[in-house]
Amino acid sequence: MAAASPVSFDDVRAAAARLRGIAHRTPVLTSRTLNSAVGAEVFIKCENFQRVGAFKFRGAYNAAAQLSPEQLAKGIAAYSSGNHAQATALAARELGTSAVILMPEDAPRSKLAATAGYGAEVVTYDRYAQDRTALGEALAEDRGLALIPPYDHPHVIAGQGTAALELLEDTGALDALLVPVGGGGLIAGSATAAKALHPGIRVIGVEPEAGDDTRLSLASGARVTIPVPRTIADGQALATPGEITFPINQRLVDAVSVVSDEEIVHAMRFAFERLKIVLEPSGASALAALMAGRVDNPPRRIGVIASGGNIDTERFAGLIAR
Amino acid sequence: MAAASPVSFDDVRAAAARLRGIAHRTPVLTSRTLNSAVGAEVFIKCENFQRVGAFKFRGAYNAAAQLSPEQLAKGIAAYSSGNHAQATALAARELGTSAVILMPEDAPRSKLAATAGYGAEVVTYDRYAQDRTALGEALAEDRGLALIPPYDHPHVIAGQGTAALELLEDTGALDALLVPVGGGGLIAGSATAAKALHPGIRVIGVEPEAGDDTRLSLASGARVTIPVPRTIADGQALATPGEITFPINQRLVDAVSVVSDEEIVHAMRFAFERLKIVLEPSGASALAALMAGRVDNPPRRIGVIASGGNIDTERFAGLIAR
């Protein structure tokens, strides 16, 4: 008998209630140009417009909000070089507590500043010499902080699932849902919501070609570890699927497509020039898969999660010029 | 006794009815970061998300839709190097007629292609050797086409006013409304709607420093002609206010602020990095005026029209790198 999933549709609905009025209900964008280009009706869930510029706030807040008052009084912590850092910092501020965020000392200045700007204490480390997991756990234990993991936690996963829940509430039934895959939290939560609402929906993950650990793991039936991927999609540059996310995705994800960095840049350019929105590389990967023909037999009505838009103008200009 | 205005609030409301289901009702964006930065509650009307990427579609369609069936059967025409070209081309297609658009032969390839992509016939001319007004009028007369002017027509002005009408419907009363000024059509229509709904609202125009023909004209009480302005805000690089727009703006516009190209780039960068939206220079000028402190005594609740987002990635990168 299969074990019960650590994340149920009720958990996603409870997360949605918790996030109401705190996270943004992000818009769903459509484009005639895009529909003609791909021969389908496409609905883009714009998580680049989410607070902190990415879906990560949903999961971080949903997890932090379920801590005990005693734990919240002590504070929370996270380790992240990316959007989860800002997400946890903002979740702490919204809940009236403090956050300590462990970030690599060579993280983009803008991300360090943004995280500190939400009122968090930023602790830096040397990512080439120090192990962030050990450091993060030591830091949390020393100070009595609750560590909010970036994806491998049922409350984080349930929070991320509210993105798909909102999308499907707005669009009604879809034939497929394309979701970027990093650690697998967004797709695990999204698939939980999507399959509960519409059991026939195809949930398709999208990974960068160089970082297809989830695709390989699904194919081999167990979590595979690959060399740390080199890809512009920094939010998806993970070496192995999550312990908690992977079994969920094994059960609920129908396929994983991969995209090249060039295909991602093409989608970022299209988003900029035609949709007038800013997507970071990871945030554009699902759109890229659809536009590059990486989705087999694309069905008629397709949801695409555009997961984030945190990229500064200089990096954007550099990627476009490649 | 003052002559009746060529554009009434009823005209704007009639335009809104005509545009329903055809133009987008564009979103109104808010940002906590922006509000803290300027110390006000700011509501950005995102006309960069309008069809063709700018407010221009509102006016072009509203004018074309009021032509007689006989005239529509013959076709329409426009001369424009910018967003009005695409707007007229799309209006023609929506109305089932043809369009001939006169564009400078050195217009950006992307704009020539986009205009042709909407099904228009594009006729190019040498802007250094030929007079576009004379050419356009000759072309329209030869072929029996109705010329849709970019701003100096009551139907165009009424159409543009629907941007402010929608904004105020969404926000309720505002203390001030900031509107980019080129030929003056957008602000004339917007002021007509805004002052009818909320007589106390301050309507503030924004021009590039180098192209302050409307500011000078309002100060001197008559239309002034300046040298063709050199500014990155190409949509606002006009030498003199419109014949029809100017008297309306004399009556309804409370002040005109000016912004530098650097202030515009700063606002474009802020829009990209924090709001995750793409604005072209003209489209960012009103936001720039607010952010640069160019608006005297900014009141509590301010509407800002972000008028367009048509800029390709290469030009954007070039402006950001300056």
Image: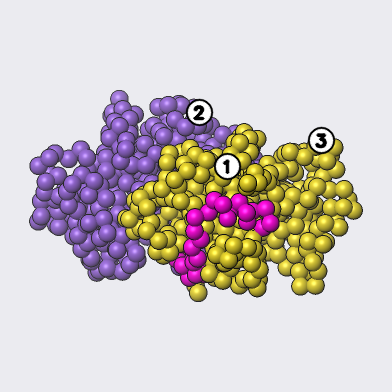
Chain colours: A yellow, B purple
Question: How far, Cα to Cα, is label 2 from label 1?
Answer: 33 Å
Which residue, given by chain and number where applicable, does mark 2 sit on? B173
Dot 1: element: helix
- How many C-alpha atoms fall within 10 Å of the one at disc 2: few (<14), some, or many (≥20)? some
Give yes or no for contact between labels 1 and 3 (Cβ–Cβ under 8 Å): no
Q: Is residue B275 above or below residue B66?
A: below
Question: How far, Cα to Cα, is label 1 from label 3?
Answer: 24 Å
Q: Give the image location of residue B264, x and y in percent.
A: 52, 55
Is residue B164 left or right of A87 when viewed as pictured? Answer: left
Q: Residue furthest right?
A: A142
Q: Give the image location of residue B72, x and y in percent.
A: 14, 44
Identified by mark 2, the residue type is: Ala
Camera-nearest label, 2 or 3: 3
Where residue A162 is drawn, which disc sits there?
1
Which residue, given by chain and number where applicable, does mark 3 sit on? A69
Q: Is residue B167 above or below residue A215?
A: above
